[in-house]
Amino acid sequence: QVQLVESGGGLVQAGGSLRLSCAASGRTFSYYAMGWFRQAPGKEREFVAAISRSGRITNYADSVKGRFTVSRDNAKNTVFLQMNSLKPEDTAVYYCAADYSGVVRTDSDEYDYWGQGTQVTVSS
């Protein structure tokens, strides 16, 4: 089992940057593909980015491609989401998730474990 704890959210002006972290418990972090999702008020949870076990394969939603970068440090059991050029429409609760299959996926139903989320608010 994996427990995930996100951090790094906050309030930022449009055009600014934030770096989210997701710390995982357990010794098998490197077995999991990791994903980032977000949910804005009144909207469904949506895929943001995902990274393979090794970190060599990544995938991004079109809406964040070129602005967000997902990375991981398996030695520190942590996955990161660097968010640049933030827009008001990026405002949401951001969640990290772990997928034991190790496959980089965009469907939230495929992920096995979830963090509690961290709020990101981008002001215009």
Image: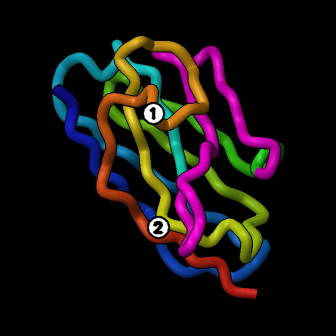
* Residue 47 within the segment the image draws in magenta: yes
- Mark 1 and mark 2 residues within 8 Å of each other at the beta carbon: no
Image coordinates of residue 79 in percent, x first then y, are: 44, 37
Q: Which residue is mark 1?
A: 109
Image coordinates of residue 39 in percent, x first then y, are: 53, 61
* Amino acid type, mark 1: Asp
Q: Secondary structure at mark 2?
A: loop
Vertically, is 112 above or below 80? above
Vertically, is 2 above or below 118? above
How crowded pointer 1 is (Cα within 10 Å; few <14, some 14-19, many 20+) is rated as few
Vertically, is 50 above or below 80? above
Q: Which residue is mark 2?
A: 9
Dividing the picture into quarters, in which one does residue 77 lie? top left
Residue nearer the viewer, 56 or 107: 107
Q: Which residues are magenta?
A: 38-63
Dividing the picture into quarters, in which one does residue 11 lie? bottom right
Q: How is the image coloured?
A: rainbow
Extreme-bottom residue of the structure = 124
Residue drawn at x 62%, y 72% is 91
Quarter holding the N terminus is top left
Residue drawn at x 76%, y 87% is 124
* Amino acid type, mark 2: Gly
Image coordinates of residue 57 in percent, x first then y, are: 64, 17
Q: Earlier in the sequence, mark 1 or mark 2?
A: 2
How crowded pointer 2 is (Cα within 10 Å; few <14, some 14-19, many 20+) is rated as some
Please give the label number shown on residue 84. none
State left or right for residue 77 relative to residue 17. left
